[in-house]
Image: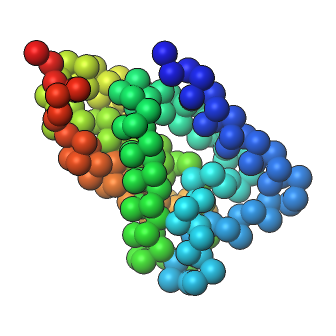
Amino acid sequence: MRITETIIIVGLMWIIELYNSSVGHSLGMWGIHPRSVDGLIGILVWPFLHANVEHLISNTIPLAILSWFILLRGFKDYLIVTVGITIVAGVVIWLVARPAIHIGASGLIFGYFGFLVAAAWYEKSMRSFIFAVMTVFLYGGIVWGIFPQATQISWEAHLFGLLSGLLFASFLGPDEEHKTP
């Protein structure tokens, strides 16, 4: 039931973090640097880089659960949503965020949250409704993360991840595969 893909995705982030830890977290320089040519590469890799092991620990369980929910819809949807959120949110972060290095899977988690909740609205299926209820029940409190709090937390990644998830739910909206008869 798509557990293997979830383990691979989360495992990949852990492998990257373990390597990053071994090189003094120097991979962080590849995060998004807003409005900087050097920061453009970050648009593709920002969710895979973390400030430290604690940062990745805080992202691991929500990432695994919400990834799994989307993977249950199918790998194609998962790929579209993940790549879409990464690039769309990444571009907007690069264009408008405050000067800082923006990294971490939390923006992707917010995108998954937005996607799963909005998919229920667009698809109007029992399956998507159940996923939305479970998502809100488990992680509804994260919505406060779209507001500025600590300076080391990219609320911009949270906000633009969430908005990107909403956008991709509208793109993948009702189709024959997700409609309830």
In the current view of this chain or complex, which residue is farthest to the left? 181
In the current view of this chain or complex, which residue is farthest to the right? 22
Q: Along the line of sight, which residue is nearer the eye, 77 or 162? A: 77
| For residue 1, above or below residue 41 | above
| For residue 163, above or below residue 71 | below
**Residue at the spot 10% in from the left edge and 15% down from the top edge:** 181
Q: How many numbered discs sit on the rendered protein?
A: 0
Name the side, left or right, on which 123 lies relative to 50.
Answer: left
Query: Residue 31 location, x and y as percent?
Result: 63, 66
Name the side, left or right, on which 169 lies relative to 121.
Answer: right
Name the side, left or right, on which 111 lies relative to 8.
Answer: left
**Residue at the spot 26% in from the left edge and 52% down from the top edge:** 167
Query: Residue 56 location, x and y as percent?
Result: 67, 44
Query: Residue 2 location, x and y as percent?
Result: 51, 22
Query: Residue 101 location, x and y as percent?
Result: 61, 70
Q: Along the line of sight, which residue is nearer the eye, 16 or 2? A: 2
